[in-house]
Image: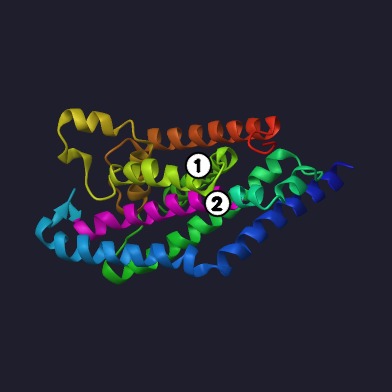
Amino acid sequence: MSAGFASVRWIGFQTIVMREFGRILRIWGQTIVPSAVTAALYFVIFGSLIGRRIGQMDGVDYMQYIAPGLIMMAVITNAYANVSSSFFGAKFQRFLEEISVSPQPNWVIIAGYVGGGVLRGLLVGLAVTVISLIFTHLPIHHLFLTLAAVLLTAVIFSLAGFINGVFAKNFDQVNWIPTFILTPLTYFGGVFYSINLLPDWARALSFANPVLHMVNAFRYGFLGRADVHVGFAFAIMTLSALVLFVIALWLMKRGTGMRD
């Protein structure tokens, strides 16, 4: 019986992930291309033009320094956007009710949507990585840490996007958090600069930004350099993923946003 339940749950998980994957590929012009084009513009403007005047940042070429940050920024925004828009779309089109009454437990539904967000985040991250290799060389000092950082970050922001999708009542509310919260967090998260350049009060304030720890853990995997303690960064990411998953599970159990 337990093997049968496990098989049913695996099928449910696969179905949601494959639906999300098909959606990503079907509208690839909206899901993959924009971030790749934006990254190329960042490399041209910040890397080639401004980077020549800056020279090196934290002992490495400036374009090489910003590459991991731009990859991570693409992963964050796309993992978040995929789940928040997709889950809200399921509510808006009224087929979420069919998923809710299926024999799938809530954690499988959450895992399916998060899996779709992770897929989009990694696909876009791979596309931006390819773009970055056109402009600079990216060595990998710690492959396992690089993969762990990007996977954990994609999971965290997929879960955050899921929670946004639960509470959203219209498409404006889906776009509100990426515009007014995610964008400032990523821009002040050490993507374009080392926090060692900041005054003491601003540096201390930056440590409260979780994106700073994610970007630096990822950069450490590539370049072997970070502005934060890498072990502490992974502890923050792991705890964030667990807390967000528990919140998402609790919201699903209460039916928040699905009974309106």
Predominant SS of the magenta segment: helix
Task: Report the front residue among 104 and 1.
Answer: 104
Three-letter code for the amino acid on which mark 1 is drawn: Ile
Q: Please tell me whether mark 1 sits on a helix, a strand or a loop.
A: helix
Task: Report the front residue among 215 and 120.
Answer: 120
Q: Residues within 10 Å of mark 2 (few under 14, many from 20)?
A: some
Three-letter code for the amino acid on which mark 2 is drawn: Ser
Task: Report the front residue among 83 and 212.
Answer: 83
60 vs 115, left or right, is left
Q: Residue 134, relative to residue 224: is it above or below?
A: below
**Which quadrant of the figure has residue 226?**
top left
Task: Report the front residue among 98 and 126.
Answer: 98
Per the rendered image, the range of residues in magenta is 61-86
Q: Residue at the spot x=17%, y=37% of the render?
A: 198
**Which quadrant of the figure has residue 5?**
top right
202 vs 31, left or right, is left
68 is within the stretch colored magenta = yes
Q: Please tell me whether mark 2 sits on a helix, a strand or a loop.
A: helix
What is the quadrant of the C terminus in the image? Answer: top right
* Rendered location of residue 45, percent (x, y): 21, 63
Residue 129 disc label = none
Badge 2 is on which residue? 85
148 is within the stretch colored magenta = no
Badge 1 is on which residue? 156
196 vs 145, left or right, is left
Q: Residue furthest left?
A: 53
Name the image colouring: rainbow
Q: Residue 127, relative to residue 86: is it above or below?
A: below
Mark 1 vs mark 2, CA separation in Å = 16 Å
14 vs 8, left or right, is left
Q: Residues within 10 Å of mark 1 (few under 14, many from 20)?
A: many
* Rendered location of residue 17, percent (x, y): 65, 56
